[in-house]
Image (cartoon, grey):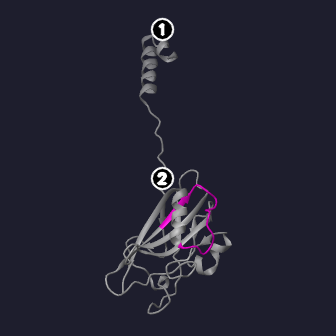
Amino acid sequence: MARAHACRHPLPHLRIALCCAAAALVAQVSIPVRAQETFAVSSATWHSGGQVQPAQIFNRGDCHGENRSPQLTWRNPPAGTRSFAVTMFDPDAPGPGWWHWAAADIPAQVRELPENASGSGDLKRLGAVEARNDFDVDGYGGPCPPPGKPHRYVITVYALSTDRIDIAQGQPAMMFDHEISVSALGHAQLTVTYGR
């Protein structure tokens, strides 16, 4: 307002032109607002749309893998994130699908899980809790679908609004999923496939 008023003062023509140009520039220039980067997850073990590696396959019955949970890295969680949770679900299994993994109470400062974080005790050392998967085992249970069409395995990292979910170690993964969804601020996913 002050600049527009100054342009009406009886100044030399050159100064008037410069003053009015500056006022017009201020009126037209908008400061760009940087958008929040997308919450995303990646893995050195798997890439989205790729195949499950032998090290991540389950190790029971006719499945002979190493049952090592995948390496995961995530970035750009939503504002207000106080902890993270990770799940792995097979939507192609018969019935309601198959829970392979659910872990919660991963501290907010953590942005990466090394390969085999479940079996090595790394998650436990972070103070995280893990569900009982549909193999009836606590922690990670790798892919082991019946022979036939390959199945999809969806890894989801959730950003949560709470430090801890209200559920104990070893409860069914479906219960973990419910408690995680109550506190979720956002999620990031990658999907891999495996068939026998």
Mark pair 1, 2: CA separation = 47 Å
User: Which residue type carries mark 1?
Assistant: His
Q: Is residue 55 above or below residue 171?
A: below
Upstream in sequence: badge 1 or badge 2:
1
Q: Is residue 129 magenta?
A: no
- Residue 9 numbered tag: 1
**Residue at (53%, 82%) from the top-left corner?**
136
Range covered by the magenta-colored residues = 156-172
Task: Tell me the residue that label 2 is attached to.
Answer: 37
Above or below: residue 12 compared with residue 35: above
Establish if 124 lies above or below 184.
below
Q: Are marks 1 and 2 in contact (CB under 8 Å)?
A: no
Q: So how many labels did they put on this image? A: 2
Q: Position of residue 49 (x, y in %)?
A: 37, 72
Q: In the structure shown, which secondary structural element does the residue marked by tag 1 occupy?
A: loop
Location of residue 117 by image quarter? bottom right
Residue 185 position, x and y percent, is 52, 54
164 falls in the magenta region = yes
Give me the residue at 44% from left, 14% from top.
16
Quadrant of residue 97 within the rendered picture: bottom left
| View extreme (left): residue | 149
Q: Quadrant of the C terminus?
A: bottom left
Q: Secondary structure at mark 2?
A: loop
Main SS of residues in magenta: loop
Q: Is residue 70 left or right of residue 120?
A: left
Work out which residue is located at the far bottom of the displayed protein and give it.
62
Rendered residue at 54%/73% (across/down): 172
Who is closer to the viewer here, 158 or 172? Answer: 172
Q: Position of residue 124 (x, y in %)?
A: 65, 74
